[in-house]
Amino acid sequence: MIGFGNMEDLPVGAVPLVQPRMFPVASPAWISSNPTVRSPADLSRVPLIHEESRQQWLDWFAAVGHDPKNQLSGPRLWNANLGLDAALTDQGVALATPLNAGADIAAGRLVELFATNISLGGYYLLALPNRWSETNLSAFRTWIKASMMPSRPDA
């Protein structure tokens, strides 16, 4: 299983993979219709796309030094992929990483709103202890670790 979580609190036996930058993204159309969003603090006044809870956004705001005085608005969706889909369809601002939004950013479908260097967790690989020595799982672990290692400073 590949999971995402706090790197200081991984499940027992988990193998850390990568701790990518996390940053806000929105579609070009959303950005055009919201010209007053010029700083991270401005984001706390617009609809934000949340995963299961609003905590990830609260953690991101804390990392940039902003304490939102109001309750954050916007839909709560099941996972990051749904959040990116919502951002792609002009529904608000989502938090993303180069791993899950890099292709959409490169294609111009999403835009990174602010250049920040914030990591709010990371990806890990987890398997039953008795399976780590299996040939296929061992090969997969080697491949996934190499594939997810940041090769660029923006990862």
Image (tube, rainbow, N blue to C red):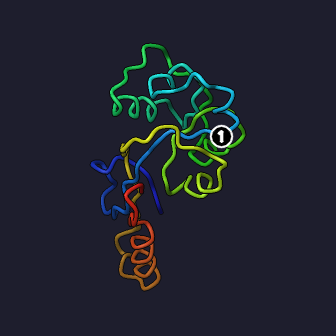
80 relative to 74, above or below: below
Residue drawn at (49%, 29%) of the image: 54
132 relative to 95, above or below: below
39 relative to 118, above or below: above
Direction from residue 149 to residue 107 in the image, left or right: right
Direction from residue 78 to residue 131 in the image, left or right: left
Quadrant of the snapshot with the C terminus: bottom left
Query: Under tag 1, what secondary structure?
Result: loop
Which residue was labeled with disc 1?
Answer: 27
Q: Position of residue 71 (x, y in %)?
A: 49, 17
Residue drawn at (56%, 52%) of the image: 101
Classify residue 50 by image quadrant. top right
47 relative to 100, above or below: above
Camera-nearest residue between 7 and 105: 105
Q: Position of residue 34 (x, y in %)?
A: 63, 25
Residue drawn at (65%, 50%) of the image: 108
Q: How many numbered marks does the figure carry?
A: 1
Residue drawn at (67%, 45%) of the image: 85
Classify residue 16 by image quadrant. bottom left
Q: Position of residue 59 (x, y in %)?
A: 38, 33
| Residue furthest bottom in the image | 135
| Residue furthest top in the image | 69
Q: Name the amino acid type tagged 1.
A: Ser
Classify residue 55 by image quadrant. top left
Q: Position of residue 74 (x, y in %)?
A: 60, 26
Mark 1 closeness class: few <14, some 14–19, many ≥20 residues within 10 Å: many
